[in-house]
Structure formats: structure tokens, C-alpha cells
């Protein structure tokens, strides 16, 4: 077939040549739409304006007025920021950006010295100049060898390493604007002029692939919107969120406090403990109502249990370990309830009459989170997880999933 059918949100169907791009579809509908479009949406996902269509699709054009446009604008501003960093610091190497552009963008850089506030001002100024140029974004599909040659010639050794993260058989796409090129899936705006307002927020340290033994990188965060009005509204939301931040409100209300001598392990004060126990009482009532039995399993297990469960191999670095009193004994502090509940279930022979058996537990869990990731009560090392496991026969699985997914007002 030489033509494909493109179905629009209003039900209209366009018959167009196979290989037509999303942007060309927008132009077919009208020049005004083509000018305002920043991306398309197919099967629920955002796609680039330069994407060629090779099959029948239902297509929605995303313009600067759509909320989803913000994600594309922030992603594109991310590239503008990397371009600006290279203009200001030619020897900087670029690692990767952010996958979630719902509110922010970011990039990691390998540089000789940490970025300073003055550096961020220079970068912002350079970004403004790039945006004023309204430089167009271009999409290019290349072979793995070609990509390796391009980034090798540019001295972008981190990008050459990142090529290994792309599965064999998957398209390798580059995006260019002006002289800047990066390894990226997109989507991106048609041109930088569609970035209405932007700001750099902060800089922090990071590590290549999150490995603390690897090179230390500098991460710059920022945000961007289609208009200054949206940026103003965002800043207002941020200020309001600071006022409600539980890390500030909790100590003020004498609910809990965090102590550097016990990182990631909150101290619950009397008022906070009353709230905590009230939540447990609520959950215990739901347990009784829905046929769960509360249990309590040990805090310490020999490494053998986690080796059997697979947690030892997959999560060893995320757990706390220490040597036991017996020679060669390795003990792990419980980071999850699953192995303990399975061990409890196999502690004796079970009858089918006992099934389904629903076990639940509130006991403390401890995880070896990196200090840089800790944040109030939302990312901790010590927690109580309202956790349950259901043991049942295969034919009972469907009913149990239905029970577990049924939401009840409490």
C-alpha cells in the first residue's frame, strides 16, 4: 500500500502517503496548527513531529496550549542547556538527561570543577541566546557504528559508553539543533523558539550510572514552560509546597524529627506516635474485615534465606549485613517481609482447607539507601511497611486479585 489512513480526534480520516511525518500531517490540516504543534500523540505516547508514519494510526496533534506540551518543551530545553554548557565549557563531557519531564529537566556533566552560581548564570545567558536563534531540531536515525564514530570524534566518551545501554535491534536516534548533537529518543519541539520561559534551579553531584566508585558528575536541574504565565504559576506552586513540606511541618507540630546521628531513621515524638498507632489500628480493623492474619517475623536472618529468595543476588547492596558470632555466619537485617512470610508458611505441612491464607505484618524494615537519596519520611532507611502475602491455590488467584484490588472507603 502506498497510502495510510490517519484518524484525527474529531473522527476525520486523512489518506496520506506512507512515510508522511507527524509535522506534515499538521501542515496538511492547516499552517496555524503546524506552527503551534510541538509533538503528536499515538497510542497514548508522545511522538516527534519528524517521525515518519508507516501504518494506519489515530493521531492527536499536541500544541503549546496542551498540558502535555510542557514535557516536550522541558525535554528540548534540556538539550538547549547541554548545548549552552558546551559553549561555556568546551571540555565538558555530557552524560544523560532525565526520562521524566513532567516538571523538570536535568543533565549530568563530567567537568574539572563543580559548577558555581556564577557558572549557572553564564549557562542561562547562553541558553537565552540559543532560544532567540529559534534553531530547528532535527531527527536522524543512524547505525551503531556511525553513532560511535560521531561521538568519538566529538570526544564525548560518556556517550560512546551509553551506546551499550541501547538494546541490539533498537533504532539509534540522534537529535541536532545547530552544531549540537545528542543521543536521544525525543520527542522535541519544532524549533527552540517554542520554549517560552525557562530557568535553572540547582546543581548537585551525581555518579556515572549511580556507581559511587565511578567518576563524579555535576547535575544541573531546570524547568521550562510554553509561557511566562505558566512559569509564574509553577513558582507559586513551589512556594506553596515549601510551606506544606512535611520535613518542616512535622517538627513544628512535634510529630517527628530527623537526627544526623541516625540518617534516614526518624524519631517519632508522642504526637506522631499517636498518629502512627492510629493508622495501625485502622489497618488492623481492615485486616479483620478482609480475612488477613497478622504475624511478626524476625528482624535477622541468615544470608541463606535471602539466597534462596533471590534477594541476596539482586539487592545485596541495598541491605544491611554483618558477621554473626559463628565462624562464617552472615546475617542480614530484614529489608522486606516476603522471605520471612514464605519461611513461616513452609514451617509445617499445610492443608488445602487453610487456603487462601492471608498474612500481614507491620514490623520494621531497614534498607541501605544512599545518604544522598534520603528525604524526610518519603525516602528512609527505617520504615514499617503495611505488607501482606496471600498463599492460595491456582484456581483461587483470580478471586484473590479481585479482592486485593477492590478499593474500600475507610
Image (cartoon, rainbow, N blue to C red):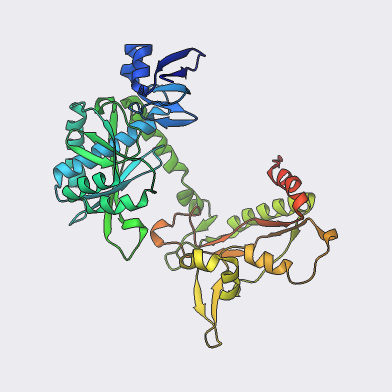
**Residue 256, x across and y down, in percent:** 52, 57
**Residue 174, x across and y down, in percent:** 28, 38
Which image quarter: residue 100?
top left
Which image quarter holds the C terminus? top right
Q: Is residue 89 left or right of residue 49?
A: left
Q: Number of labelled discs?
A: 0
- Identified at 20% across, 38% down, the residue is 180
Q: Is residue 404 left or right of residue 140?
A: right
In terms of depth relative to the viewer, which is nearer, 238 or 339? 339
Which image quarter: residue 371?
bottom left
- Identified at 74% across, 72% down, the residue is 347
- Residue 64, placed above or below residue 237: above
Q: Is residue 212 left or right of residue 283?
A: left
- Identified at 36% across, 13% down, the residue is 28
Q: Is residue 354 left or right of residue 38?
A: right
Q: Is residue 220 visible?
A: no
Amino acid at each position: 500500500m502506498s497510502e495510510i489512513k490517519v484518524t484525527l480526534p474529531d473522527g476525520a480520516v486523512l489518506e496520506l502517503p506512507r512515510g508522511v511525518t507527524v509535522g506534515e500531517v499538521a501542515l496538511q490540516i492547516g499552517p496555524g496548527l503546524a506552527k503551534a504543534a510541538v509533538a503528536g500523540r499515538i497510542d497514548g505516547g508522545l511522538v516527534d513531529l519528524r517521525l515518519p508514519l508507516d501504518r494506519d494510526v489515530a493521531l492527536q496533534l499536541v500544541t503549546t496550549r496542551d498540558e502535555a506540551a510542557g514535557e516536550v518543551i522541558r525535554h528540548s530545553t534540556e538539550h538547549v542547556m547541554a548545548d549552552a554548557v558546551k559553549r561555556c565549557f568546551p571540555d565538558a563531557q555530557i552524560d544523560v538527561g532525565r526520562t521524566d519531564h513532567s516538571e523538570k529537566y536535568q543533565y549530568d556533566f563530567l567537568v574539572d570543577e563543580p559548577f558555581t552560581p556564577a557558572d549557572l548564570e553564564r549557562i542561562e545567558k547562553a541558553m537565552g541566546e540559543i532560544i532567540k536563534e529559534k534553531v530547528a531540531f532535527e531527527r536522524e536515525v543512524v547505525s551503531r557504528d556511525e553513532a560511535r564514530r560521531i561521538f568519538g570524534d566529538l570526544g564525548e566518551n560518556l556517550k560512546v559508553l551509553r551506546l551499550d545501554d541501547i538494546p541490539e535491534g533498537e533504532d539509534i536516534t540522534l537529535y541536532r539543533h545547530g552544531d549540537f548533537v545528542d543521543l536521544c529518543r525525543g520527542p522535541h519541539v519544532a524549533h527552540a523558539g517554542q520554549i517560552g520561559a525557562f530557568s535553572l534551579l540547582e546543581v548537585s553531584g551525581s555518579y556515572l550510572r549511580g556507581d559511587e566508585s565511578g567518576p563524579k558528575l555535576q547535575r544541573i536541574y531546570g524547568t521550562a514552560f510554553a509561557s511566562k504565565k505558566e512559569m509564574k504559576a509553577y513558582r507559586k506552586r513551589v512556594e506553596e509546597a515549601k510551606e506544606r513540606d512535611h520535613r518542616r511541618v512535622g517538627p513544628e507540630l512535634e510529630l517527628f524529627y530527623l537526627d544526623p546521628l541516625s540518617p534516614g531513621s526518624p524519631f517519632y515524638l508522642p504526637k506522631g506516635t499517636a498518629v502512627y498507632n492510629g493508622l495501625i489500628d485502622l489497618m488492623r480493623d481492615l485486616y479483620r474485615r478482609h480475612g488477613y492474619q497478622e504475624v511478626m517475623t524476625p528482624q535477622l536472618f541468615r544470608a541463606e534465606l535471602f539466597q534462596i529468595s533471590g534477594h541476596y543476588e539482586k539487592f545485596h547492596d541495598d541491605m544491611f549485613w554483618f558477621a554473626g558470632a559463628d565462624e562464617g555466619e552472615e546475617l542480614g537485617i530484614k529489608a522486606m517481609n516476603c522471605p520471612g512470610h514464605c519461611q513461616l508458611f513452609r514451617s509445617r505441612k499445610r492443608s488445602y482447607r487453610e487456603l487462601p491464607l492471608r498474612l500481614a505484618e507491620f514490623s520494621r524494615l531497614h534498607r541501605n539507601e544512599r545518604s544522598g537519596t534520603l528525604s524526610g519520611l518519603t525516602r528512609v532507611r527505617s520504615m514499617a511497611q503495611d505488607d501482606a502475602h496471600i498463599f492460595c491455590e491456582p484456581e483461587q488467584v483470580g478471586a484473590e486479585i479481585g479482592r486485593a484490588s477492590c478499593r474500600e472507603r475507610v
